[in-house]
Amino acid sequence: MEAQAGNEGVSQVVLEAVNIDFSYDNGYKVFENINIEADSGKFVAIIGPSGIGKSTLLRILGGFLKPDRGEVRLMGRVLHEPTPEVALIHQSIVTFPWMTAEENVMLSMKTKNMDREKMEEKAREALARVGLEGFEDLYPKEMSGGMRQRVAIARAFAADPYIFLMDEPFAHLDELTAEGLRQDIYNILFSGETPLKSVIMVSHNLTEVLELADVIYILNNIPATVVGRVDVNMPRPRNPRNDDFNANLDMLYSYLTPPRKRE
Ligand code: ADP
């Protein structure tokens, strides 16, 4: 059965990039006419050669960088600046060493006019959601890398976002930890118990992408544009040793040719 978050069965565009052009201040044009859509209940992955603009695109989607042309829309409204409704999760694990797990999670609620008791309750709830019940009082140095990444995800959850933007979220973890966390994350994300409706993940690990994604956008060329969109219909859980999986992997690799400079 396909997981559906939010409005059951009704597909709704959560976040979209429409006709985006973007150049950095030094004049380097990263994107020309990017169109991407994340629908409710869908796990979206963005892949492309290194340096093509994947992290830049996530920052545009989060409202941290302003496109030169086009717009980002969150639930139909134009996004002009970062909002807690869109949570960006970085590839480096950002936890503050002088704060406990619970205090790290509470950081994301500081801007909401909430009393301390309510914040603590929500933080504990978010930690339990990522499998850290009972670890609320640990400091980052007492945790493994996987646990710290779970704290970072709990912090994102506690702000009640509609969408997660994840930049290589498993890149700094050992493979066994990453594997466990990937499976948990997918289940948590689409449990339907939170306002979260969709996820956009950037990754260079194509096996990981095929394991998780419903939709894959491929970026290539300079300036970059979307050169392919793949809907992945393999049943879950997906097995990387399966023939179908490998055929899909080959197809994705075939898109990742060295970027060509466009005329
Ligand atoms: P990816 O995530 O796909 O590896 P990035 O989004 O990090 O790619 O970078 C895209 C391109 O933009 C790269 O060529 C990079 O060197 C350039 N770039 C990134 N940040 C800046 C910046 N602040 N100023 C100028 N160029 C940048």
Image (tube, rainbow, N blue to C red):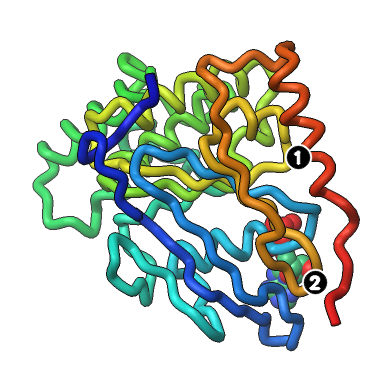
Q: Does the Cβ of the disc 1 residue fall within 8 Å of ligand 1? A: no
Q: Nearer the viewer, mark 2 or mark 1?
A: 1
Answer left or right for 6 relative to 241. left
Answer left or right for 210 relative to 29. left
Q: Amino acid at mark 2?
A: Ile
Q: Quadrant of the N terminus?
A: top left
Residue 124 image point, x, y percent: 24, 27
Residue drawn at the location 68% of the way across and 67% of the way down: 225
Marks 2 and 1, how far apart at CA: 19 Å
Judged from the image, the secondary structure of the residue bearing numbered disc 2 is: loop
Judged from the image, the secondary structure of the residue bearing numbered disc 1 is: helix
Q: Nearer the viewer, residue 164 or 247?
A: 247
Question: Label 2 belongs to which residue?
Answer: 222
Residue 111 image point, x, y percent: 23, 59
Residue drawn at the location 24% of the way across and 54% of the way down: 110
Q: Quadrant of residue 41?
A: top left
Q: Quadrant of ligand 1?
A: bottom right
Q: Could you classify mark 2 by the number of other residues whose Cα lies within 10 Å: few (under 14), some (14-19), or many (20 or more)? A: some
Residue 161 image point, x, y percent: 30, 48
Q: Quadrant of the C terminus?
A: bottom right
Q: Nearer the viewer, residue 18 or 114?
A: 18
Residue 151, compared with residue 67, is above or below; it is above
Answer left or right for 242 relative to 180. right
Q: Quadrant of residue 155?
A: top left
Q: From where the camera sits, is residue 92 visible? A: no
Q: Quadrant of residue 126?
A: top left
Residue drawn at the location 51% of the way across and 36% of the way down: 214
Residue 252 got which mark? Answer: 1
Residue drawn at the location 34% of the way across and 54% of the way down: 14
Q: Nearer the viewer, residue 36 or 186?
A: 36
Residue 183 got which mark? Answer: none
